[in-house]
Amino acid sequence: MLRDTASSGGGAMDPRITNLESTTFFGRRLTRRQVADIQETVALLPNDSRSELAKTICEHLNWHTPKGDYRVSACLRMLERLEGFGILTLPEKRDNGSGALPPIRHTAASDPQPEIACDLSALEPLSLRAADGHAERAEWNELVDRHHYLGCPRPFGPHLRWFVLDRDGRRLGCLLFEAASRTLPARDEWIGWSERDRERRLHLALGNSRFIVFPWVAVPNLASRVLGMAAARLPGEWERRHGCRPVLCETFVDPTRFDGACYRAANWERIGMTAGRKSGRRAKPAKEILVLPLDRGFRDVLRGRESPARSPRPPRPDLDDPLVAAWLRIIDAATALAEAHDRRWMKRRRVLNSLIVMLFVFRLVLSRREKGYATVTAELWEQCRKLGIALPQREPVVASSICKARQRVHEELFLDLHREILRHGGDGARWKGRRVFAVDGTKMNLPRGLVDAGYPLPKDGAHYPQGLVSCLYRLDTKVPVDFSLSARACERTAALGHLHALEAGDVVVFDRGYFSFELLHAVIRTGAHPVFRLQANGVAAFRDFMAGDGTEAVVAASPGPDTRRELARRRPGERFDPVDVRLVRCRTGGDGFNLATTLLDADDVSADDLGALYQGRWSIEELYKVSKQTVAVDEFHGRTERGVRQELYAHFNLIAMTRLLSGHGDGLLADMREDGEERQTVNFRNAIAVVGANLEETLLAQVDAVARAVTRMAERILKVRSRLRPGRTYPRKSMKPVSKWNRRRATTT
């Protein structure tokens, strides 16, 4: 580990390090002790590539870009400079064997289109759409490579590709913004940059390295209008994607080809010429340098005198944004449900209406039982006061009042709200055109008082009763769809209660222990397809398959006489005819398991597809992990069955609302991901904390304030990310802290 101070221990320092005139490299000031540690690290890792060394040193120095990536490029240049001083010897540069990048293939997609010759007003409103995703990036590359005189560059590092679209979605041109030139004397002199300032703040300047209006588009003033739109949107979009807000943009115009009129019409300023290159294979003509300030105080920012300015007045939110619109519909539904509940159940006007009680329960759930009623109520009142949200009285209500108000709010209100969240939250992606669900249950300890409500003690001498929480979970959107709390510990019976949420064509995955003919036929009656993991049971056809060597079989599954009599007793009048069931033996990562399903077409759904589908059900286990560790839902404040159900259902509401935002963020991350980049996902713990911190504003404020809050939450959620680690496993264990009773038992046995 590289040390942070010069006082760290170690032997005599290399005199070449002691005699360095400066230990500041590319904006990063190091101590001589840290330089010595870098020297030692390079010597200890002779087999690492230069890139691997740079990543290791960046990790030790905590040297990151604003986006959070390692500053590999700057670190490599620092290492090369230290090598030039004779302080270290880098390994030889490695040939990765890739050679020159293959040429971009031109297809019919980039063929010239019918001419567009009209007034600009006939195309408005114009829009800029990021070329996100592999397919759109390939189309952007092909269009630019074919129609721009310089061809398509291969951008390295942070960049932003845009398509220019007209109101009908036709593509009119392309833009590319990336990092500014490392050294540009005319620009540096115009800014007043020292070398140190430039190295520290070069990331705050961007370069417009490609701009093309397609040859078949002949529309006066289009180019300057597009440049103006790009300048307005660029700072915020770059900050959202790459973590820093640029304040200056530069570009180069070849005067032998263009006069740069569109740039000057968009307020770009000419500040000089590049030197060019007069001879050699890569001769380049001298070009005009044009710049556009993106911030009024750009010089002070670039010289380190102040941070990039923010608009003092927040921009009016886009109410047509799909995420904002969905959230507003959910809030409208929550308000309407609460008002309808009040009209039905309240005999007289009260200080605390149902909406405030719902908000209180949400806050209570997120407090993880670390705060009492009085503290949570005081925080709610204080937050509303700061936001200017009117409440029924100036001072917080007393704890006993909020406790009584909870008793008057039916837990069904939270179930109704959940249905509205699902209705307005969007459908999400599908697996082979089907929605995919999983069912699982978990036992939870409940308050002692629920013994009187019929919840059993798990064993003689136990203090707390237990209940079964069961959930139908959408695997692609990671949203709980239906859930229940029951005193009976039978997971199969609980699963039957979720089937009303299924539609024809859906697929629902069950773990071991769920198979029964009652559940199999109940799923089939909905038109859905079950996928069961098998275990040794009384179905002879299943036992024979599991004992054999075959990998697939289709059998007619039929209940035996005893099972048929029990089904007739439990389900009088229902038929349980034989069902064709496909049995599949799967092996993934060394683990083998057997599945049974009514998805019979192996050409449509292969054995590998089924194996991957079953393994995908692990995310429902992650749901309960989030519930118990992040939200601590099993630490109930309520002491009655109604109070427990309120908190349990409210926790599912919060998870669904957070998934709406985190799913939006995951979609953006997937679109922004370049080929070969490490996959990332939104950090859900941070996401649920962000939602919890903005509950009052998103539930009680006016429309514009709610929209701004949703936009702000989405941005904050996107900034904290986690790396996806497929195939990661860990032992299942209890995360409960060891109590004094458990500790005593452990030491006496």
Image: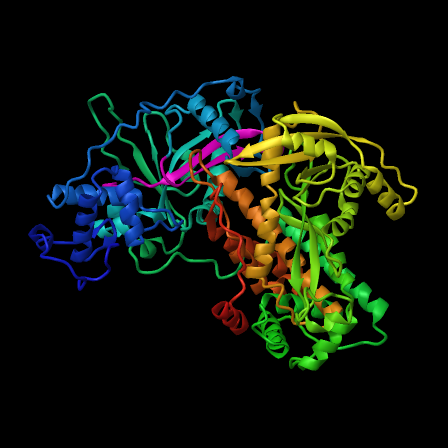
Side (left or right) of 279 relative to 206: left
Q: Which residues are magenta?
A: 156-185
- Residue closer to the observer: 508 or 93: 508
Question: Is residue 568 found left or right of 30 in the rendered image?
Answer: right
Q: Residue at x 68, y 68 (%)?
A: 460
Q: Residue 232 location in percent, x, y?
A: 48, 46
How far across and down, in percent of the image, does residue 574 sit?
Answer: 89, 40
Judge by depth and name the residue closer to the eye, 651 or 517: 517
Color scheme of the displayed model: rainbow
* Residue 715 or residue 226, whichever sits in front: 715
Task: Point out residue 661 in the picture as x, y percentages from the top left corner.
Answer: 59, 51
673 within the magenta span: no
**Depth order, front residue of 638/158:** 638
Q: Give yes or no for residue 184 being in the magenta stretch.
A: yes
Q: Is residue 316 visible?
A: no
- Left or right of 451 in this view: 119: left
Vertical order, 733 against 599 (above or below) = below
Look at 45% across and 58% down and name the residue there.
Answer: 310
Rendered location of residue 708, percent (x, y): 58, 57
- Residue located 38% across and 21% down the image: 102
Q: How many marks?
A: 0
